[in-house]
Image: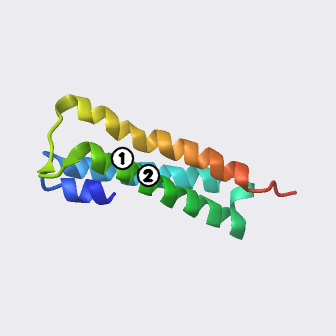
Amino acid sequence: MITAIISKAFVYNGEVWLIGWLVCALLYFAILISFRRNRTKNGIKNLVFCFLTVEFLVDLVWSLIYYDRSGYVNRGIAALYWLLLWPAALAAGGILAARLNKPVD
């Protein structure tokens, strides 16, 4: 998200990037909270931990792709595909978080 906020000044319609980020984050929590095993105190901790870990890693990858030593680098339409890393990584993090949580009887 930090990369998206910084890039808002450099990217035309950068607000759409932030809206997409927010929608993915809301869907992540809405879908995973709907399962009983994720509604426990430990389950919520695992969800938040996996979310923050995914956020950090994706932000790191985005900053390496979209920024150079001199600043923002416009990579054209090819850079758009790297934005899909966020929902894919969130899905993987959600599956991991759900696996870490114990089933509720």
Per the model, the C-alpha gap separating discs 1 and 2 is: 6 Å
Q: Residue at 18% of width from left, 48% of height from top?
A: 68
Label 1, on which residue? Answer: 61
The amino acid type, in three-letter code, at marker 2 is Leu
Classify 10 Å Cα crowding around label 2: few (below 14), some (14-19), many (20 and above).
few
Label 2, on which residue? Answer: 57
Q: Please, which colouring scheme is shown?
A: rainbow
Classify 10 Å Cα crowding around label 1: few (below 14), some (14-19), many (20 and above).
some
82 left or right of 38 in image: left
81 left or right of 45 in image: left
97 left or right of 82 in image: right
Residue 73: quarter of image: top left
Residue 22 is marked as none
Image coordinates of residue 48 in percent, x first then y, are 56, 63
Image coordinates of residue 57 in percent, x first then y, are 44, 52
Report the residue that reaches farthest toward the bottom.
Answer: 41
Image coordinates of residue 105 in percent, x first then y, are 88, 57
Which one is nearer the viewer's eye here, 71 or 6? 71
Residue 47: quarter of image: bottom right
Report the residue that reaches farthest toward the front.
Answer: 69
Q: Residue at 73% of width from left, 56% of height from top?
A: 101
Q: Helix or strand or loop: what does disc 1 sit on?
A: helix
Report the residue that reaches farthest toward the right.
Answer: 105
Q: Helix or strand or loop: what does disc 2 sit on?
A: helix
Which one is nearer the viewer's eye here, 65 or 92? 65
CB under 8 Å between discs 1 and 2: yes
Is 30 located above or below residue 48 in the figure?
above
